[in-house]
Image (cartoon, rainbow, N blue to C red):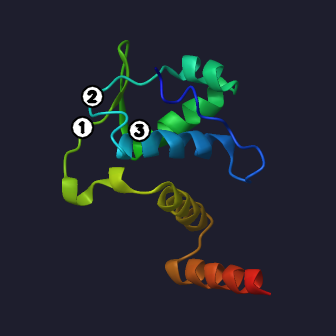
C-alpha cells in the first residue's frame, strides 16, 4: 500500500498544498517508510490519489529533488535518493524544520539577511503573546 494514499491535505492550516505534500514525503523518507532507492508514486498518480493538481505535486517533487531527497530518472520514475553524507543528511529534519527552511529561503529571496529574519521572528513571537 502507498503510504501517501492515506495522507489528507489540510486546507485550514495555512500551509500551501505543495509544502504539505513536500513535508509529508520528506517525513516518510526521513522515518524510513520510503527506503533509499525505492520508487515513489508518479506525479500524476499522486495528484489523482490526493485529488490535487499535477502542478502542485510536481512543484513538491522538484523542491524535494533540489534538496536531495529524491532523484528522477528519465523514463524510469522518481526514487528516494541515496544518502551520501550522513553528517550533512537532511533526511533527519522534522516537518517543522522543513517549514522553517522554506521560510528562511523565502525571506532570503526577498532580500532579508539573517538578522532581519531573526528580528521578524522575534516580533511575531512577541505579537502572539499579547
Q: Give the spatial CA distance, label 2 vs label 1.
A: 6 Å
Q: Residue at x 56, y 81 (%)?
A: 118
Q: Which image quadrant is residue 69 in?
A: top left
Report how many numbered discs are placed on residues in the image.
3
Q: Is residue 94 above or below residue 10?
A: below
Mark 2 or mark 1, earlier in chain: 2
Q: Helix, strand or loop at disc 1?
A: loop
Q: Helix, strand or loop at disc 3?
A: helix
Q: Give the spatial CA distance, label 1 vs label 3.
A: 12 Å
Q: Considering depth in this image, is 12 or 43 the residue closer to the camera?
A: 12
Q: Are marks 2 and 1 in contact (CB under 8 Å)?
A: yes
Q: Which image quadrant is residue 99 in?
A: bottom right
Q: Residue at x 19, y 46 (%)?
A: 84
Q: Residue at x 57, y 36 (%)?
A: 59
- Count residues near mark 3 (Cα–Cα under 10 Å), then give few for <14, some for 14-19, many for 20+: some
Q: Residue at x 45, y 57 (%)?
A: 94
- Count residues near mark 1 (Cα–Cα under 10 Å), then give few for <14, some for 14-19, many for 20+: some
**Residue at the extreme top:** 75
Mark 1 or mark 3, earlier in chain: 3
Q: Give the spatial CA distance, label 2 vs label 3.
A: 13 Å
Mark 2 or mark 3, earlier in chain: 2
Report whether 12 appears left or right of 119.
right
Q: Quadrant of the C terminus?
A: bottom right
Q: Is residue 65 above or below residue 85?
A: above
Tell me the mark number nearer the camera, choosing from 1 and 3: 1
How far from the left and from the top, in percent, is residue 6? 58, 29
Residue identified by numbered label 2? 37
Residue identified by numbered label 3? 65
Question: What mark, if any, has residue 82 been given in the picture?
Answer: 1
Q: Helix, strand or loop at disc 2?
A: loop
Q: Is residue 20 above or below residue 35?
A: below
Amino acid at each position: 500500500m502507498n503510504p501517501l494514499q492515506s495522507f489528507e491535505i489540510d486546507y485550514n492550516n495555512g500551509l500551501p498544498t505543495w509544502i504539505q505534500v513536500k513535508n509529508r514525503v520528506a517525513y516518510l523518507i526521513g522515518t524510513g517508510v520510503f527506503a533509499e532507492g525505492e520508487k515513489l508514486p508518479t506525479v500524476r498518480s499522486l495528484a489523482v490519489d490526493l485529488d490535487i493538481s499535477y502542478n502542485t505535486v510536481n512543484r513538491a517533487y522538484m523542491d524535494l529533488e533540489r534538496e536531495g531527497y529524491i532523484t528522477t530518472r528519465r523514463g524510469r520514475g522518481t526514487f528516494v535518493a541515496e544518502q551520501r553524507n550522513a553528517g550533512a543528511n537532511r533526511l533527519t529534519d522534522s516537518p517543522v524544520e522543513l517549514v522553517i527552511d522554506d521560510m528562511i529561503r523565502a525571506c532570503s529571496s526577498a532580500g532579508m539577511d539573517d538578522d532581519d529574519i531573526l528580528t521578524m521572528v522575534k516580533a511575531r513571537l512577541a505579537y502572539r503573546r499579547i
